[in-house]
Image (spheres, rainbow, N blue to C red):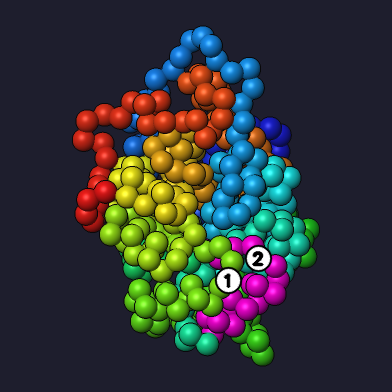
């Protein structure tokens, strides 16, 4: 149980679910309402096929790519995820694993570890923010990330505060007090390994979000910061142009599925976009991101770096996305399952599984580099693609 090498993300998930209390495991999977988008993100990858070759194949393959000025050893990076309590080392373990495997770390502003420590663990860190609070408060958070040495900004826009799940939502306490401990005790008792990990690290999980802190304020709790975000009027494109002007490094807009939004992101000066539906956690019924990708890439791929996140569970998924127009993919849950299963080594394991899968898919397809991948390498069933919001 737990430790030891695993051969697939599916196995990382099984091990994670044997370690985590059910509430934490459920919070990690999340998924809005009926989970249609959550399921489609992975099912759509399964609906795509490969068109392999049998000879004249390259003896070695180059997996490296550049994303927002960073050279990565594989076309996979860590998507920002704000989820607490998975592992005491949290984003530090993920950042170290990404650094050890030559890739970048996306750090959520709702993460558990301060940006300064995460950048120290992985200098290739992109800091993610939401449009939360006044312009002044947003500026202060950017300033802090810049001073910490974050090499890029991720602005996540696809959130509409959907809080209902047909399967029911896990109990997340406001704070770890006696009442919360009493309520969670039965499931924690069934997951002693998780508790032991926390006790060894010096305590129980806190629910503060240190990257939402403004100078002079104590780090807010998750719910206080979430409240600030909920009460902030959603940004206009003018707000986003202002935001872009406050960050002089590379900037990604994450959460785009429509062609018209992709074009507006180019207009406001984004370096990159991620075709994303927040891992199916947002507006349920949004198509799988791999369905939306080809039209978005055709529309703006020459003007902006196009990435994809959502549903990536194997190296072949990354290869499908790159062949259909993405420069790289970002992983959310896959990294979290690796983290829960085996800490830093578990995340490294996940990245190794993905790397091996990408390499075998390139070999099968007869491609010497990810840059050589083309749409013709992929079998796309009729009616698969979803071109949303205009003509490519
Ligand atoms: C539990 C959880 C928390 C997340 N928190 C954030 C966040 O704080 N910021 C953000 O930009 N995206 C967040 N996301 C979305 C991920 O960055 C990413 O878009 C998604 O997980 C990709 O899908 P995948 O999990 O299938 O790889 C979260 C996703 C999950 C599952």
Q: Nearer the viewer, residue 42 or 33?
A: 42
Say which residue label 1 marks. Answer: 248
Q: Which mark is residue 150?
A: 2
**Extreme residue toward the bottom, this view:** 216
> Height in image: 174 above or below 125?
below
- Residue 145 in sight from this viewpoint: yes
> Height in image: 143 above or below 374?
below
Q: Which mark is residue 341?
A: none
| Rendering coords of residue 91 (x, y %) | 65, 58
**Extreme residue toward the top, this view:** 55
- Residue 31 in sight from this viewpoint: no
Task: State which quarter of the image contains the N terminus.
Answer: top right
Res 162 → quadrant:
bottom left
- Per the rendered image, the range of residues in magenta is 137-154
Mark-to-mark CA distance, 2 and 1 = 12 Å
Task: Residue 388: say if magenta.
Answer: no
């Amino acid at each position: 149980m737990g430790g030891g090498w695993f051969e697939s993300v599916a196995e990382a998930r099984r091990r994670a679910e044997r370690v985590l209390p059910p509430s934490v495991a459920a919070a990690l999977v999340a998924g809005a309402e009926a989970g249609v988008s959550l399921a489609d993100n992975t099912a759509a990858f399964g609906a795509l096929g490969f068109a392999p070759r049998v000879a004249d194949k390259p003896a070695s393959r180059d997996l490296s790519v550049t994303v927002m000025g960073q050279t990565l050893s594989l076309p996979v990076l860590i998507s920002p995820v704000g989820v607490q309590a998975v592992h005491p080392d949290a984003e530090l373990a993920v950042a170290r694993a990404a650094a050890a495997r030559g890739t970048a770390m996306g750090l959520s502003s709702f993460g558990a570890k301060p940006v300064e420590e995460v950048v120290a663990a992985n200098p290739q860190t992109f800091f993610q923010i939401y449009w939360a609070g006044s312009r002044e408060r947003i500026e202060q958070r950017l300033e802090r990330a810049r001073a910490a040495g974050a090499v890029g900004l991720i602005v996540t826009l696809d959130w509409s505060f959907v809080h209902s799940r047909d399967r029911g939502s896990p109990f997340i306490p406001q704070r770890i007090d006696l009442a919360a401990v009493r309520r969670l005790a039965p499931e924690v008792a069934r997951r002693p390994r998780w508790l032991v990990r926390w006790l060894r690290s010096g305590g129980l999980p806190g629910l503060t979000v240190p990257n939402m802190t403004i100078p002079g304020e104590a780090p807010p709790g998750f719910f206080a910061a979430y409240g600030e975000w909920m009460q902030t009027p959603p940004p206009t494109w003018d707000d986003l142009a202002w935001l872009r002007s406050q960050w002089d490094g590379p900037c990604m807009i994450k959460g785009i599925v429509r062609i018209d939004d992709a074009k507006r992101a180019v207009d406001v000066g984004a370096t990159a976009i991620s075709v994303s539906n927040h891992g199916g956690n947002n507006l349920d019924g949004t198509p799988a991101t791999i369905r939306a990708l080809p039209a978005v890439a055709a529309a703006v791929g020459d003007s902006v770096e196009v990435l994809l996140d959502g549903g990536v569970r194997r190296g072949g998924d990354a290869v499908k996305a790159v062949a259909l127009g993405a420069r790289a993919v970002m992983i959310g849950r896959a990294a979290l399952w690796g983290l829960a299963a085996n800490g830093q080594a578990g995340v490294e394991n996940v990245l190794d599984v993905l790397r091996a899968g990408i390499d075998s898919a390139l070999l099968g397809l007869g491609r010497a580099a990810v840059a050589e991948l083309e749409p013709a390498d992929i079998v796309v069933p009729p009616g698969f693609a979803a071109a949303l919001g205009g003509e490519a």
